[in-house]
Image (cartoon, rainbow, N blue to C red):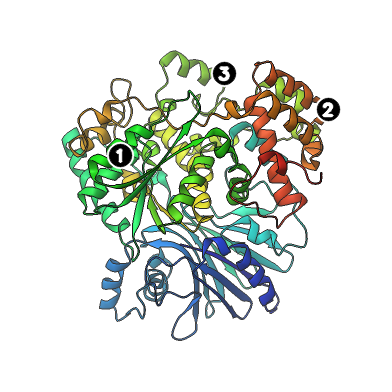
Amino acid sequence: MCGLAGLILADGARPDTGDLHRMAAALAHRGPDDRGIHCSGPVGLAQTRLAIIGLADGHQPMVSDDGRLALVANGEIYNYLELNRELAVEGVVPRTGSDSETILLAYTAYGLPGLERLRGMYAFALHDASAQRLILWRDRLGIKPLFWVRLPDRIAFASEIKALLAILPRTPPIAPGALRQFLENQFTTGRDTVFEGIQRVLPGEALLIDHRLQVTHHRHWSPLAATPRDISADEARRELDRRIRASLTEHMRADVPFGLFLSGGVDSAVLAALLKAHGAGRIKSFSVGFEGTTMADELEQATGLATHLGFDHRPLRLSVPRFMQRLPHSIWAADELMRDYACLPTSLLAEAAGSELKVVFSGEGGDEVFAGYGRYRPALPERLYKRLRYPGSGGFRVRGQWHRHWRRQLFGAALTASPTPDRAPFVAAWQATPSCWSDLQRRQYTDLVTALPDNLLVKTDRLLMAFGVEGRVPFLDHRVVEFGLSLPDGLKVRHGQGKWLLREWARPLLPPGYLDRPKRGFHVPVGAWLTAEVATRAGQLLRRNPGVREWFRSERIASLVAARRAGRGGDRELFGLIQFAIWHRLFVDEPGLTPAPDEDPLAWIAAGP
């Protein structure tokens, strides 16, 4: 697990190593173990390394024996052992114990088709000097991030946006449509980010860039390849067993100890039982909950399961103010605007794990793959009404995060006039699905290509990597994803409950009744923090923030604060403004600032006294 960055210049120019060092410095948290720079012709590559596999000989950038190829990679190639055995038959033998070298070897032996044989979570840049092209490649599900930006004389790329901002002549303008997406959908998604010109390499996509800076987009995988299947429950159980155990066997490959985030829900419980069954032993597990609030959590269930499995468990029970102190640092770590309250406990878990480990397992993806969310199974009247009222996505993901009253009151002219519909990404995803798919499959797919890579996996990657921790997500092995998508609806949802097949298959692995509890999710009591005093102070500070003044009608913030003080709602909107204001200060007003892990959020809303 690492951070990567680089440049490719036009017209025979050579990269400035100072730029590469600045980009690497911005990614130091992703790779505290090593750092490297390599330049060849118009291409410069930089990497910061978190050593997980091939500890002694995995330095990057990696360069082939003949000097033709150079590589910087982030992530893990889980099937590197199998591929290395195949490559050895072709006479291509690794020099190191690093899984990243398998990327070079597969490309040497098979070209681009060799890269399609990689399994894992990864983003990498591969420079082929003889072919005069640079390849930017991102894994199938978008577990690992990769961004790029085109300038007049170059293209720059990096694992995080902050590394691009470090070398740009000026901070790019904010894109109004993307900002609205954050406000209404709680994240931005698709190719475009909140900064104009800075783009994502999409999940399952590669960019092929020649030395004239012409870019070809290459799609190497899509969930749309999944074909609905007519399969019995018994056959599905057997196939699930094969696929998920194969995934876990590969995911457990590491030259360092690993642990587990244990939430108390179905996915992390199944993962915990599987790790135990696969001989993980007395691994360290971590859970978090609240104190001083009436909001329920699952800390006791997680602790009980850890005890049952014989894990070395670390339960964290913390106050709501302690959670909220994570806000500035979690915004800095995420790079992107996203209003997922779960970033706060994830940051605390990552810090706790990072003091002892480099690798933790997590259950992300189980709900999307096996249809666990309640939004996947709405009642028929609700589904019919929303389909008519909000056409284009079958009535799925239609509810905006901001109340229409506060949109009218607070959105500035540029936000109000934004031509990009807030629901456009969800409609586009829904419309891309084959006609033979069910509504349930379409809902799964829509989340797999929007909310999963651009919300949940941002949290899993960026919040963990801020503390030098790699997160592994076995449910997002693409073989498991394809299987889950292809299943008949009746093997995913029964008796009003999701993840039926996963529950039935995992039942023998867990204590009786554990899987029959209703899904509760993890909720952060933000309202308990937004007291009258905090809301009043936040309102005063928000009116001084340049970003808030530019994009919102700051003179109306007082009415939002008054509503919050009177208990008439506004929590979500006020928290969104606080988050945007802190983000704007960190990435627009005073880029380069790095909050400590625990800070007073209100102190970061506006600069100065």
Image quarter in which the N terminus is found: bottom left
Q: Is mark 2 on a helix, strand or loop?
A: helix
What number is the disc on residue 555?
Answer: 2
- Residue farthest top in this picture: 381
Q: Position of residue 207 (x, y in %)?
A: 54, 61
Q: Where is residue 588 in the image (x, y as percent from the top left)?
A: 74, 50
Q: What residue type is labelled 2?
A: Glu
Q: Which of marks 3 and 2 is in front?
A: 2
Q: Name the residue under label 1.
A: 269
Q: Do the residues labelled 3 and 2 touch (CB within 8 Å)?
A: no
Q: Which quadrant holds residue 602?
A: top right
Residue 142 in view here: no
Residue 315 in view here: yes
**Residue in the foreground of this view, choosing between 356 and 207:** 356
Are there few (<14), some (14-19), or many (20+) residues within 10 Å of tag 2? few
With respect to residue 69, does 322 lie above or below? above
Q: Which quadrant holds residue 289?
A: top left
What number is the disc on residue 150?
Answer: none
**Residue in the foreground of this view, choosing between 117 and 493:** 493
Image position of 453 (left or right of 374): right
Q: Where is residue 343 in the image (x, y as percent from the top left)?
A: 53, 42
Q: Is mark 1 on a helix, strand or loop?
A: helix
Q: In percent of the image, x 42 and y 20: which residue is there?
A: 378
Are there few (<14), some (14-19), or many (20+) residues within 10 Å of tag 3? few
Q: Which amino acid does label 1 sit on?
A: Ala
With respect to residue 380, does 97 lie above or below? below
**Residue in the foreground of this view, choosing between 53 and 452:** 53
Image quarter in which the C terminus is found: top right
Q: Position of residue 497 (x, y in %)?
A: 32, 24
Q: Name the residue under label 3.
A: 389
Image position of 373 (left or right of 465): left
